[in-house]
Amino acid sequence: MKTQPNLTQIFWLVAVLLALPVVVQAQFIFTTNNGAITITQYTGSGGDVTIPDTINGLKVTTVGSTAFFQVSSLTSVTFGTNVTTIADNAIFQCPSLASVTIPASVTNIGKGPMLDCKSLTAISVSPANSHYTNVNQVLFNTPQTSLIEFPGGVGGSYTMPATVTDIGQAFIGNSLTAISVDAANTIFTNLAGVLFDKSKTFLISYPGGAVGSYTVPTNVTTVVSASFEYSTGVTSVTIGTNVSSIGDWAFYDCPSLTAISVNSTNAYFSTTNGVLFDKNKTLLIQYPIAIPGSYVVPGTVVNVGVGAFGDAFGLTSIVIPNSVTNIAEEAFYGCLNLAGAALGNSIKSIGPSAFFSCRRLTGLVFPASLTSLGQYAIGSCQNLSSVCFEGNQPTDGGSVFYFDNALSTILYVNGTTGWGATYDGIPTAPCSTCGNSLPLLTISKSGNNVILTWSTDFSAFTLQSTSNLALPASWNTVTPAPAIVGGLETVTNAIAGTGKFYRLSE
């Protein structure tokens, strides 16, 4: 079964590098242990890269996890002749990488060693290597029982050999249009180009280059972790009747996915407007990232799941209602156009890298309920300049505001406890109230109506509209009066022929 590469660990690497005796030489950051060198990070300009046999006279034996992380200009990697270990996800999302050469010295290769490298077409292994081999550019262990990496740039169809009993993360980020299995294989099979276990109850891997919609067969009970992850062609998915388990990251970062639907007889899952939930809509599992614009989380939701909105490039604003208590790991990771986030007043924890690299965020108000912020929770939000905490100091998971260069001061409300001169290394200052917080007005279309919503924390505000912004604009109170729906102030207006502009006024 596949597991998602833990992106939190990718950024945890930075903290490790600060703690260990590291050295930077030429294109590499590395550590030394017992006279051997581990490459931890590549810092060069890309192109064709050769891992050296030695550095400072010491053998280079290991290339660490995510040592090559999203190096857009990297075209090839040749591992040095002393390398024995290539760690999990050693080369991660390097879109121009075309070829990798592995020497005879390598005895240990982790899961997904060249994960989601969409141009990779050639993996070569020295014929003298007794542990690994390549067959038609596909990386195997020598007995071909483990299929370790299928090159992400190879399209068309592929037939998996009868000998394979384990695939790890081999097909994550693949570009295939169909995956087939030799009929003699006792572990795996295929149906309509999709990879399953022999009983067809576990959906294991979807061909990432297959274009269009897909319906999970009725006999499937488990959609395995990362089974659709990074699939570029899938546009919609229908969950079958008997699916009772969906692994983390199953539909993560599918750039063409606009809707997930669920068979009405399924007892475990449900959808609303294409968004996947558990049956009772207390857990938001996956927002299809091809849906653009703003989104209001339903008022039934208690937990925003792992990677639920990850890499939703079109998401511009989010309203999280008062029902939500937990925002999980990487929930909004890489939402590059997320400019507004209204956090409900019941949130207790925000997980590692939850809002990492939300580069358009400029301000956040954290509710008094908050007790913990995970590592890198709000990291790399480079335009974030305003942060205010309404409650006591939450637990600092480490580097919470990593690389938030515009954030010079963290505000906290007078009378709250636990605050010192700094938080997460950033100077703090008291304030009377997080009064600079404003309601986030969200507008969505439903049939012939527009639905306008905002937090009940701002019930004193009045919704107004105008058809002309020319000064002096004439703003009128919108009817009907707002009603509370799903824990949010809600107004429904019919779409008329004349365009309207809306605002909230206090």
Image: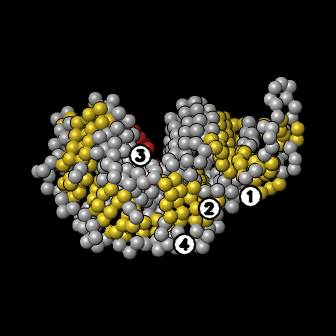
Categorize mark 2 by other alpha carbons within 10 Å: few (<14), some (14-19), many (20+): many
Which of pointers 2 and 4 lies earlier in the amino acid sequence? Answer: 4
Q: Residue at x 53, y 56 (%)?
A: 236
Q: Earlier in the sequence, mark 1 or mark 4?
A: 4
Q: Looking at the image, can residue 110 be seen?
A: no
- Kindly identify the residue that appears in the image at 78 percent across and 37 percent down: 499
Figure label count: 4
Tell me the residue that label 2 is attached to. Answer: 271
At horizontal 26% and vertical 35% (from top left) the residue drawn is 49
Q: Secondary structure at mark 1?
A: loop
Residue 447 horizontal/vertical position (percent): 73, 52
Q: Earlier in the sequence, mark 1 or mark 2?
A: 2
Look at the image and tell me in which quarter the N terminus lies: bottom left
Q: Which mark, by number, is residue 241? A: 4
Q: Is 277 drawn above or below residue 458 in the view shown?
A: below
Q: Please name the residue that numbered disc 3 is placed on.
A: 10
The residue that disc 1 covers is 486
Indicate the secondary structure of the residue bearing disc 2.
strand
* Residue 424 falls left or right of residue 32: right
Question: In 3D space, how far apart are the residues under numbered discs 1 and 2 (Cα atoms)?
Answer: 15 Å
Q: Position of residue 428 (x, y in %)?
A: 63, 36
Measured in 3D between alpha carbons, the distance from the residue under mark 3 to the one under mark 1, in whole angstroms, is: 37 Å
Instruction: Please report whichever mark, 3 or 1, sits nearer to the chain's N-terminal start.
Output: 3
Q: In 3D space, how far apart are the residues under numbered discs 2 and 3 (Cα atoms)? A: 32 Å
